[in-house]
Amino acid sequence: MNKHHQGQRRWPAAKALLSALGMTLAMLAAAPQYAQAEAADANTVELAPQVNATLGKSTLLRLPAPAARVSVGDKEVADVILINPKEIYLLGKKLGATNLIVWGKGGQSTIVDILVGMDSGALQNKLTQLLPREKGIQVSTAGDSLVLSGTVGDSMGADKALMIAEAYAGKKVVNMLKVAGPQQVMLEVKMAEVSKNLLDKLGAQLGATAKTGGVHYLLTAGFLSLTGANPLSPGGLITITDGKNTIKIDAENKDGVVKILAEPNIMAISGQEGSFLAGGKVLIPVAQTAASGSSSITLEEKEFGVGLKFTPTVLEGDVINLRVAPEVSELSQTGTAVSIGSNSSVLPSFTTRRASTTVQLRDGQSFAIAGLIKSNVTESIRRFPLLGDIPVLGTLFRSSEFQHDKTELLFVITPRLVKPLPPNYALPTDSFKAPTPAEFFLNGKLENKPAAPENAAAEPDKSAKEQPEAAAPAAPSDSTGFEMK
């Protein structure tokens, strides 16, 4: 009986021992797997999102897990300090890029890319403060430059934003601003010039002979003012002859008036330059010296005529800022004599009148550039010494010429904003209808009458209420090909 009870007591103890032994064997079998997992966690490398830092400003990076140590790639670009296991102090010291490696306490590591750029936030706030109406400007960074993007109302706003950005970053500004609805400007220019000239000439030629005994006397004085003039139009000439004595007197009075009117129309996009020239070109020889010392003559083009250069800029409220430079040049009557060795030639010279100004006008307003007046007086006298100074009688021994030229030039400039034509615009050729052969040969007509509109002939009593609300616009009175705003 006692043996049986002792056997029952030993069996639970043996059973517990066997169970503990099995658990020990299972833990020993699983230990390598746990060690491998821990080793794998300790060797992992993660890539974190990029961190953008501002030049000269510091920030704090909060870590998701405790860090044991940190290291930065380029200490000249960024300064990094581990304040506590979960906070890193970061300072941008130089424009550029580097990276940061963070080692955790478990052995895992994380790589963080750091980009140090310009302070775009300060520029964005300054643009909002100085340009409150330009709300579409966005500031970002690209490398060591600032990037301006978005939309502005006009080109003047874009220029102001660019100047403010250059105050922050110098010339390292990338301008990607777009102007909302760039407008076109047409310039109507009227150039009026009136030139008057007055020319008076008076000359004489005297030829007399006398004989006293065996001595012959000959007196000749030739001071005709028209010598070398146009032989087909020699002017007035009076000849008095008495035997061998001759007196010739020539005179000329010439008045001229020249009127020039030019009306060029030029169109350009806001902010772009437009130019116009009505005239010609001449070739002027220019001496060139080669490196070897030899000289050659090349031809250089020189323009002359009526020219105009202008740059319009459309501002807010349809105000047009206009920089305009008109010019009138012409060939001078007297050239420039040039001698090269034994060769001599006369090169053309130019008379130029030029003006340049900047104004602000509204659509359709005009301004005038006047006061370009030129007045030249030329007087010349050729005479025989002593004899030409004798009153009255000295007229036979001298030649006089008086010339007065006066020119006045006026520019009237009108800028206009251009808008697209309606779809049903009219052309000058729309009303032309070729005549039939019978009308051309029998009646001598060069064109036929245009036919009446079909709807007007078919429905003459149609009430005004049945007409469409948006009537077709009338045909423009001019033939410029566009309609003004």
Image (tube, grey):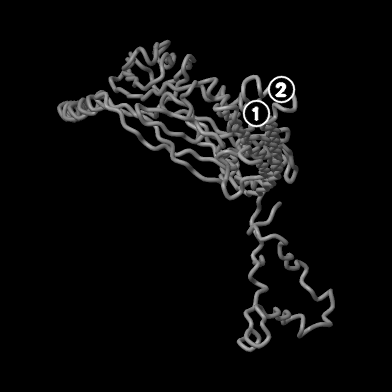
The mark that comes first in sequence, 2 or 1, is 2
Look at 78% across and 83% down and name the residue there: 459
Judging from the image, what secondary structure is the residue with disc 1 in? helix
Instruction: Give how far across and how far down residue 197 sits, in percent.
Output: 70, 39
The residue that disc 1 covers is 397
Separation (CA) of disc 2 from disc 1: 9 Å
Residue 16 position (above or below residue 153): above
Query: Looking at the picture, how far across and down is residue 332, in whole percent?
Result: 56, 36
Image point (63%, 34%), residue name:
206
Q: Are discs 2 and 1 less than 8 Å apart at CB? A: yes
**x, y percent for residue 41:** 27, 26
Q: Amino acid at mark 1?
A: Phe
Neighbour class for label 1 at 10 Å: few (<14), some, many (≥20)?
many
* Residue closest to the eye, 314 or 367: 367
What residue type is disc 2 on? Ile
User: Is 327 positioned to the left or the right of 369 in the image?
Assistant: left
Compare residues 336 and 93 and report the one nearer the observer: 336
Q: Residues within 10 Å of mark 2 (few under 14, many from 20)?
A: few
Q: Does residue 280 appear left or right of residue 475 in this picture?
A: left
Residue at horizontal 36%, vertical 17%?
A: 67
Q: Secondary structure at mark 2?
A: loop
Quarter of the rendering occupied by the N terminus: top left
Q: Which residue is mark 2?
A: 390
Q: Is residue 439 left or right of residue 147?
A: right
Can residue 310 be seen here? The reply is: no
* Foreground pick, 174 / 6: 174
Question: What's the residue at 31%, 17% (across, down)?
Answer: 73
Residue 459 in view in this figure: yes
The image position of residue 383, as x and y in percent, is 63, 26
